[in-house]
Amino acid sequence: MLLDALVRPDRFFENRAPRPSLASAFGVVLVVALVTTAVFGFVGWSMSQRMTGTTKIDNPNRPDEVFCDGFAAGGAANFSTGCDRPEQKTVVIGDLIWEGFQKKIPFVFITVLLAWPLIAVGLHVASAVAGGEGSFSNTLAVAGWGMLPSLVQMLVGIGLFFLALRGTDLSGSNPQVVLDQLQSLVATARGGTLFVSALGTAWQWVVWTFGLKHARRLSTAAAATAAGAIAFLSFLPTLA
């Protein structure tokens, strides 16, 4: 069934017209969200493991300097407030990077789930302008199935990223140097990932086209125009 949706979308949606399964579409979106989140976390963890250099940061277990200065006259009393602790502590840069990734992981999952109804609204409006008929739930199902190509896109994209990562040394102790290396890494992988993103968007366009054709009772040309407009808008953020 999944393969048909990817490579034979016209027949796939024709066999399920005019109401493609919304429950199955939700399952697709859920899998895409889980895989996207896992890939994001794996990329962050992999990079953090390569960042073995250390740097100094403010010690969160020590009170502010103003507080400690105010208790300087107290002699040994400031020891009970933690002012005897060092102002800075040494940390591994990779640990800082991984901590930042961990904070963003839930938002990645939520973003994918929220993108589904937003895309569906766009497809529904665009297909309505083209003369489409049918309920929003039908369009919602089409939008969900259209996210399936992003799984293939992610697998290829992560492969390109790790090819670029393989020749990059991230073990330095200067945070700015490591940041510059990361930016260079992203720039190296960007050309390939942009191409893959373009192919993935084109693939989604095809799936959405035939989905709208059957679920919204449109001609192929009208469905392609409506789906193409949304596919183009969804591709624009990758150029930023």
Image (cartoon, helix red, strand yellow):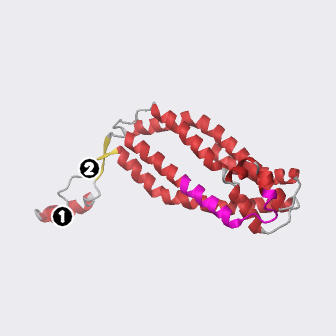
Q: Position of residue 17 (x, y in %)?
A: 81, 62
Answer few, some or many: residues within 10 Å of disc 1's Cα (few below 14, many 20 plus, some between 14 and 19).
some
Q: Main secondary structure of the magenta part?
A: helix
Q: Residue furthest left?
A: 76
Kind of residue indicated by mark 1: Phe
Residue 112: assigned label? none
| Residue 66 or residue 58, whichever sits in front | 58
| Residue 143 or residue 178, whichever sits in front | 143
Q: Position of residue 160 (x, y in %)?
A: 55, 37
The residue located at (31%, 42%) in the rendering is: 54
Describe residue 112's horizontal placement relative to residue 123 as left or right: left
Describe residue 26's horizontal placement relative to residue 17 as left or right: left
Label 2 secondary element: strand
Magenta-colored span: 13-35
159 is within the stretch colored magenta: no
Q: Which residue is mark 1?
A: 71
Label 1 secondary element: loop
Q: Position of residue 223 (x, y in %)?
A: 84, 54
Q: Disc 2 and disc 1: Cα gap in Å?
A: 22 Å
The residue located at (84%, 56%) in the rendering is: 213
Answer few, some or many: residues within 10 Å of disc 2's Cα (few below 14, many 20 plus, some between 14 and 19).
few
Q: Which residue is mark 2?
A: 89
Q: Position of residue 105 (x, y in %)?
A: 48, 56
Judge whether residue 209 can be spotted in this image. Answer: no
Q: Nearer the viewer, mark 2 or mark 1?
A: 2
The residue located at (50%, 60%) in the rendering is: 106
Q: Are marks 2 and 1 in contact (CB under 8 Å)?
A: no
28 is within the stretch colored magenta: yes
Judge whether residue 94 can be spotted in this image. Answer: yes
What is the quadrant of the C terminus in the image?
top right
